Amino acid sequence: MKNYYRIMLGKKSIYAKEAHEGNYIGAGWFDSVDLTNKLSDNWRDFNKKFIPIYLEKNPDKTKVSAGLACGMLYTIAKGILVGDIVLCPDGSGNYFVGEITGDYEYHKGKILAHRRSVRWYTKTISRSEMSESLRNSAGAIGTVSNISKYADEIETLISAGGRPASIISTDETVEDPSVFALEKHLEDFLVQNWRHTELGKHYDIYEEDGEMVGQQYPSDTGPIDILAISKNKKELLIVELKKGRVSDVVVGQVQRYMGYVQEELAEKNQIVKGAIIAFEDDIKINRALSVARNIDFYTYKIHFELKKK
């Protein structure tokens, strides 16, 4: 199954035109290092080797920042597979769309030295064509964003230029497709309104150099919906939306994310907590969390009201 990624080609898409004309995507971290024989099959092994190097070169950065940089570099160089689809902002409100056609190549002394060849489509996608949720995800901060959950919409935009009439979940772990469809949008809504939520009183979504990088933060078992940090910087919080999925899957996923953050990203003085957010109360989650440490369970309500003027 192919995946879909939003790739930034340089800060503010400064290299988008050049990369489009040269038929490639690329990344610039460790641009003096040829990664040809250093891209292990295990992302964790790559991070363990390169995070210390990144921190040595950037002593003012945190482990979270280092993990993000190394993770995005690995994704571009190795994680994205031949046949996957990339959307790259052109800097003027449109997205170049292409298919990855080649494995990693190192171009010493060039911009975005770590490259993958791309067959660009003649079709570009305008932000105005996208649904609000896809616009938010495609406009997320960070070099790499996995937008595979919008595969149906992206394929529709590529082939017909229109928006899909419905959202269908093909994930076998989804119990309730209607709730899944709703909660695909909840993540973006939660991020946009974070400061007004109960969690926002005590935590901030993780930022790097003033830019939010905590949404869909990459880990070695999948992207974390939201990675937040307490206002006193002593706690890291993993927030996962249930998205209509089987309860045991969600609890296990949060625990795996917590383990990753604890082992790979947390500083010595930081503790790691988790939070699950669901549309309604769930006895299975409550039972599981009764013997799990440092994971809270939240439900949410939607209020919709029409007022005649």
Image (cartoon, rainbow, N blue to C red):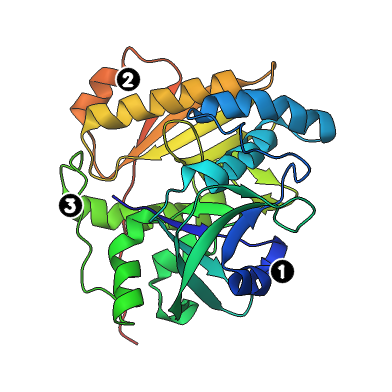
Q: Amino acid at mark 3?
A: Pro
Q: Amino acid at mark 1?
A: Ile
Marked residue nearer the N-terminal end (3 or 2): 3
Q: Position of residue 86 (x, y in %)?
A: 47, 61
Of the residues tagged 2 and 1, which is closer to the observer? 1
Instruction: Categorize mark 1 by other alpha carbons within 10 Å: few (<14), some (14-19), many (20+).
Output: some
Q: Amino acid at mark 2?
A: Leu
Kindly identify which residue carries mark 2.
289
How far apart are the two marked residues, 3 and 2, measured between alpha carbons?
A: 24 Å
The residue at the point 59 percent across, 23 percent down is 264
Residue furthest top in the image? 291
Q: How many numbered discs?
A: 3
Left or right, 55 with reference to 289: right
Marked residue nearer the N-terminal end (1 or 3): 1
Residue toward you, 298 or 153: 153
Q: Position of residue 165 (x, y in %)?
A: 21, 74
How far apart are the two marked residues, 1 and 3, measured between alpha carbons?
A: 39 Å
Left or right, 188 with reference to 30: left
Circle number at residue 283: none
Instruction: Categorize mark 2 by other alpha carbons within 10 Å: few (<14), some (14-19), many (20+).
Output: some
> In the displayed structure, would residue 203 be above or below residue 82?
above
Q: Is residue 212 visible?
A: yes
Q: Can you tell which quarter of the image residue 223 is in?
A: top left
Kindly identify which residue carries mark 3.
177
Secondary structure of the residue carrying tag 1 is loop
Residue furthest bottom in the image? 309
The residue at the point 37 percent across, 53 percent down is 3
> In the displayed structure, would residue 196 be above or below residue 39?
below
